[in-house]
Amino acid sequence: MIRKAKDIDERTPWREMTLGGEIYEPATSQYVNTGAWRTNTPVLDEEKCRHCLLCVPFCPDSSLPVKGGRLVGIDYFHCKGCGICAEVCPFGALSVKEGGEP
């Protein structure tokens, strides 16, 4: 039995995985919890955030969701804790704490 990428997880036996050249499904990375790799965690101070969205294009993991022109939090399922968002925030609304837990 060959599985689709969205049905493959860490418990899938290797014999049931789709061969690399046979996966043509788009956006399958959204199913992978890369946030579990995090050793540092960004924290959003909503009172300081001016929703300038300058941090959004710098996030390499697209982990800063925006709705209605406003930053609505941090996607910890995908965020790897690189801290780039905190470095580029001109208002100090994003900071980084040690440890992988939000």
Image: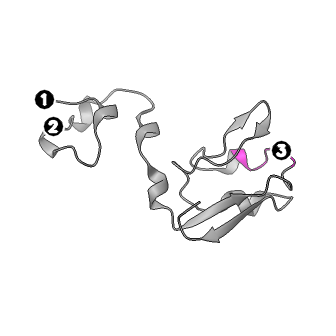
State the image coordinates of residue 101 (x, y, percent, origin top left): 54, 63
Residue at the image point whose x is 84% and y is 45% from the top: 52
Q: Earlier in the sequence, mark 1 or mark 2?
A: 1
Q: In the rendered view, does 52 fall on the left or right side of 10? A: right
Residue 12 in percent (x, y) is at 21, 43
Q: Amino acid at mark 3?
A: His
Q: Is residue 72 left or right of residue 91?
A: left
Alpha carbon separation for disc pair 1 and 2: 6 Å
Above or below residue 30? Residue 60 is: below
Q: Secondary structure at mark 2?
A: helix
Magenta run includes residue 53: yes
Residue ID for mark 3 = 51
The quadrant of the picture occupied by the C terminus is: bottom right
The residue sitting at the bottom extreme is 98
Q: Quadrant of residue 90?
A: bottom right
Q: Quadrant of residue 45?
A: bottom right
Residue range in magenta is 50-56
Q: Which amino acid is tagged 2?
A: Glu
Dot 1: element? loop
Mark 1, residue position: 1
Asked whether the residues under the numbered discs 3 and 2 touch, taking CB atoms below 8 Å apart as contact, a structural biologist would say no
Q: Secondary structure at mark 3?
A: loop
Residue at the image position 16 percent from the left and 45 percent from the top: 14
| Marks 3 and 1, the one that precedes in the sequence | 1
Position of the N terminus by quadrant: top left
Q: Residues within 10 Å of mark 2 (few under 14, many from 20)?
A: few
Label count reads 3
Tag 1–tag 2 contact (CB < 8 Å): yes
Percent across and percent down for residue 78 are 52, 48
Which residue is depicted at the point 45% across and 57% down?
A: 36
